[in-house]
Amino acid sequence: MKIHFTTLKVMRIAQLLSLALLSITVEAQSDLLLTGQVSSSAKQVINAPQSSRWQIQIQWMEEEGAIVKEGDTIAVFDGSNEQSRLDQNIESLERQVLELEQMKMEQDRKFTDAQGSLTLAVMRVEKAQIEASVPASDVSQYEKGQYDLALQRAMLEQVKAEEALRRSAQERETEIQKKNIDIQKVEEEIAYLEGLLEKMNVTATISGPITYAMHPWTQQKITAGNNLQPSWKVMDVQATTDFQIETWVHEIDAVGLKDKTKVKLIIDAYPNKSFEGYIEAISSQSEKRAQWSKSSYFPAIVKFTTAPSINLLPGMSVRIHINNTEGKPNA
């Protein structure tokens, strides 16, 4: 009987321990831990520009961490192919403008010749009309017939001259219009290439430190000499004011997580301090982060409730503690 009582007592203690562990587990699961980094809402993101090739090389980048000022050159991309094409198009434009002037002179000459031919034809008609108007009693029947025939020929030549002048004017307008279209195409190509080249030299639009982006394939920092595809992120320049925290929320954890949820923030550079914050916004569009897992993640922005009185810099790592009971609805 004593052994049986001892066994029941041990089982009761085991049950109490299990409940305690379960309670600790549930409490631990009620907290969500995210990682993020300090950033500024005033940010300039530099992406690889569009080029005439499927890849573009970055030739030079300002050093990471360097503090740049607005207007400073911070990146230079390879635009040699575009520059070569631009030079060729400029030469082509100069040649075609010269050809247009020569064409105008030639077409003006043809038009003037056609006008002269018409003037001469009109004069011949007038002469023939005078001769044909001589009374039949003053000339022989043969001469009268010759005068009438000459008048008909002169009138026919006038009609031909009028048609030639019309064709000359039409040809002049058509040829000049075609050449102007060719020139316009070259000018548009020049403007397009100049726009590309302008994007090859990137200047800072804000003042602040530079942060390099990660190569999406190698997961290493992008450096000068890398070949990049258009629109890939290369670097960013962030102001040293208006700090916020960028983070990514796993699709499972994002379910029911609400804006304005309060969070506790611990900056790795200041591990002995904690700060209050809140979730300002969670994107409704998820993104794949292949370097993490096959799952989807939702980008989110976290704000400080009160601006911390410490020296913050973009890129500092932050741990974000969220109480799930605050961020999610009750079951």
Image (cartoon, grey):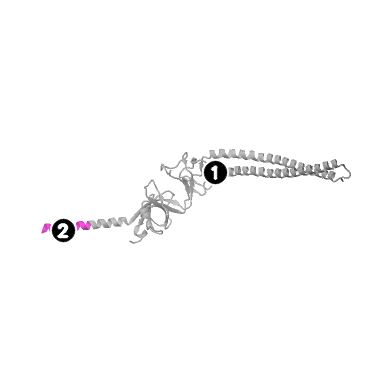
Q: From where the camera sits, is residue 308 visible? A: no
Q: Which residues are magenta?
A: 1-17
23 is within the stretch colored magenta: no
- Report the predominant secondary structure element of the magenta stretch: helix
Identity of the residue drawn at 25% across and 57% down: 20
Residues at discs 2 and 1 in contact (Cβ within 8 Å): no
Which mark, residue 8? 2
- Give coordinates of residue 150: x percent, y percent: 81, 42
Mark 2 neighbour density, 10 Å: few (under 14) some (14–19) many (20 or more): few
What's the CA distance linking mark 2 and mark 1? 82 Å
Which mark, residue 196? 1
Q: From where the camera sits, is residue 196 visible? A: yes
Q: Is residue 135 left or right of residue 40?
A: right
- Give coordinates of residue 210: x percent, y percent: 47, 46
**Amino acid residing under circle 2:** Leu
As drawn, the residue found furthest toward the bottom would be 330
> Depth-wise, is mark 2 or mark 1 nearer the camera?
1
Mark 1 neighbour density, 10 Å: few (under 14) some (14–19) many (20 or more): some
5 is within the stretch colored magenta: yes
User: Where, by quadrant of the figure, is residue 25 drawn?
Assistant: bottom left
Identity of the residue drawn at 59% across and 38% down: 88
**Amino acid residing under circle 1:** Leu
